[in-house]
Image (spheres, rainbow, N blue to C red):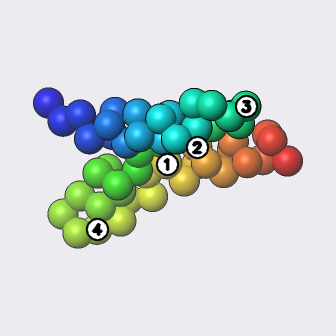
Amino acid sequence: MNAQSACAAQFVYWHMDDTKAQWCHIDLAGPSFPKNRGTGFGVALLSETVRRIA
């Protein structure tokens, strides 16, 4: 239906492929602002990820 998030992840991969860096792509743009209103989508995911890493 819409491959923009997959394209964004591929773009990041192309620029990091030759490094040993670990990375993760989370596309928040679409679900974050449906109908011009913030939803908080992804905040809990990012918060928990940072908490577990730190």
Q: Are marks 2 and 3 in contact (CB under 8 Å)?
A: no
Residue 7's mark? none
- Is 2 displayed left or right of 19 in the figure? left
Q: Are marks 1 and 2 in contact (CB under 8 Å)?
A: yes
Q: CA distance from mark 2 to mark 4?
A: 19 Å
Amino acid type indicated by mark 4 = Arg
For mark 1, give the secondary structure.
loop
Whether residue 46 is situated above or below residue 18 in the rendered picture: below
Residue 42's mark? 1
Query: Could you say where residue 43 lies in the image, as x and y percent from the top left?
Result: 54, 53
Residue 45's mark? 2
Q: Are marks 1 and 3 in contact (CB under 8 Å)?
A: no
- Considering every residue shown, the one lying at the far right of the view is 54
For mark 4, give the secondary structure.
loop
* Circle 3 residues within 10 Å: few <14, some 14–19, many ≥20: few
Amino acid type indicated by mark 1 = Gly
Whether residue 46 is situated above or below residue 1 in the rendered picture: below
Mark 2 vs mark 3: which is more N-terminal? Answer: 3
Residue at image x 23%, y 58%? 34
Q: Can you say which quadrant of the picture contains the N terminus? A: top left
Amino acid type indicated by mark 3 = Lys
For disc 3, the marked residue is: 20
- Is 53 displayed left or right of 29 in the figure? right
Query: Could you say where residue 33 lies in the image, as x and y percent from the top left?
Result: 29, 61
Residue at image x 28%, y 68%? 37
Amino acid type indicated by mark 2 = Leu
Query: Could you say where residue 54 lies in the image, as x and y percent from the top left?
Result: 85, 47
- Considering every residue shown, the one lying at the far bottom of the view is 36
For disc 4, the marked residue is: 37
Q: CA distance from mark 2 to mark 3?
A: 24 Å
Q: Which mark lies nearer to you, 1 or 3?
A: 3
Mark 3 vs mark 4: which is more N-terminal? Answer: 3
